[in-house]
Amino acid sequence: MLIVYNLIFTSAPVRLVNGGSSYGRVEVLYNGSWGTVCDDFWDIKDANVVCRQLGFYQASGAPPEATYGQGSGTTWMDDVNCQGDEASILHCAHNGWGSENCGHSEDASVECLAVRLVNGAALYGRVEVYYSGQWGSVCDDGWDINDANVVCRELGFSRASGAPLQAKYGQGSGTIWMDGVSCQGDEVSLKECTYDADTSDCSHSDDASVKCEVMVRLVNGGVSYGRVEVYYSGQWGTVCDDGWDINDANVVCRQLGFSRASGATGRAKYGQGSGTIWIDDVSCQGDEASLLHCAHNGMGNENCSHGEDASVECV
């Protein structure tokens, strides 16, 4: 059976097929017909664009090789190369419509995060989950730090520092999807936890929230100085030095328990990292409690090399 979740949030229609409401094979509508996307060079940046286009926070995966089944008909896009901040996959570079050298065994897919934080900031807010085509809130009956830890890790953070109740970050609207959530704390998704779908005894004044933490470390230096790395989405990565200054360094140093920074160096002074560059164009005011409270391009959205890894020196 062909299962189609056609979610059109922009002028460029895109849908997920043969999966669920938040995951599946990517198909785009062009010239009056739906077609697939080839997985050549398909990566998390491309998947992030699709997921945001569909109304999700970000992607958790970019599966290749027809993970959610082979499509049929035209393969519309090949060699997709998104920067990650585009509003639509149709804004991304690609070979041109129908210009491809792929078979449907190479159809690209996405897995989108079906949980988000609303009315707060990157690290905190009201918890909402996506189900049956719409976002809805979670009732705070039984809500605790174990539940919050699952949400925070699902969003890519290290853990939760709080599990606020009673709509601390404002009341939602529409459906309340979950009540009596009871997580052990090691689940990978909130939907894996035990919960009650009957939410008739809840109101939006009972909406649950979380406060998440992100780990920061200094590498290749000493206790108080080194290359800045942050832990996100299950892995450590670096910070690009574009715009990196003493305000940004002060935030990192205080987050690590120091009083302030004495230096904010770039150009990989303490050696080049490896793997993902998580943050670029950081712009802190200097009084934020965490680096992720500062303005930046979005996690993983960067145009840097590890020769530009940022460092700090704390006192």
Image: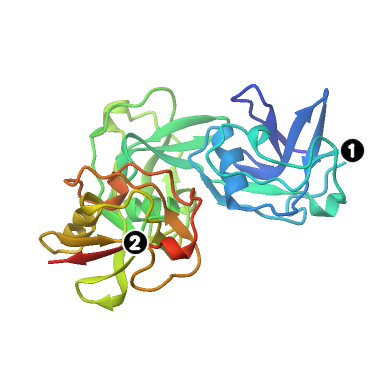
Q: In terms of depth relative to the viewer, which is nearer, 21 or 27?
A: 27
* One can see residue 213 in this view: yes
Foreground tag (2 vs 1): 2
Quadrant location of the N terminus? top right
Along the polypeptide, which appears first: circle 2 or circle 1? Answer: 1
Q: Indicate whether 179 appears above or below 154.
A: above
Q: Indicate whether 310 appears above or below 120.
A: below
Residue drawn at (84%, 54%) of the image: 105
* One can see residue 18 in this view: no
Q: Amino acid at mark 2?
A: Gly
Count the numbered circles shown: 2
Residue drawn at (34%, 30%) of the image: 201
Query: Helix, strand, or loop for circle 2?
Result: loop
Residue drawn at (59%, 25%) of the image: 9
Task: Return the x and y of residue 225 as percentages of the image width and height.
Answer: 23, 71
Q: In terms of depth relative to the viewer, which is nearer, 186 or 197?
A: 186
Task: Return the x and y of residue 100 as percentages of the image width and height.
Answer: 85, 45
Residue 97 image-quadrant placement:
top right
Which residue is denoted by mark 1 in the rendering?
A: 73
Which residue is denoted by mark 2 in the rendering?
A: 266
Residue drawn at (46%, 59%) of the image: 277
Number of the label disc, if any, that sits on residue 309: none
Quadrant location of the C terminus? bottom left
C-alpha span from label 2 to label 1: 49 Å
> How many other residues sit within 10 Å of disc 2, few (<14), some (14-19) or many (≥20)?
many
Q: Amino acid at mark 1?
A: Gly
Q: In the figure, is residue 236 to the left or right of 104? A: left
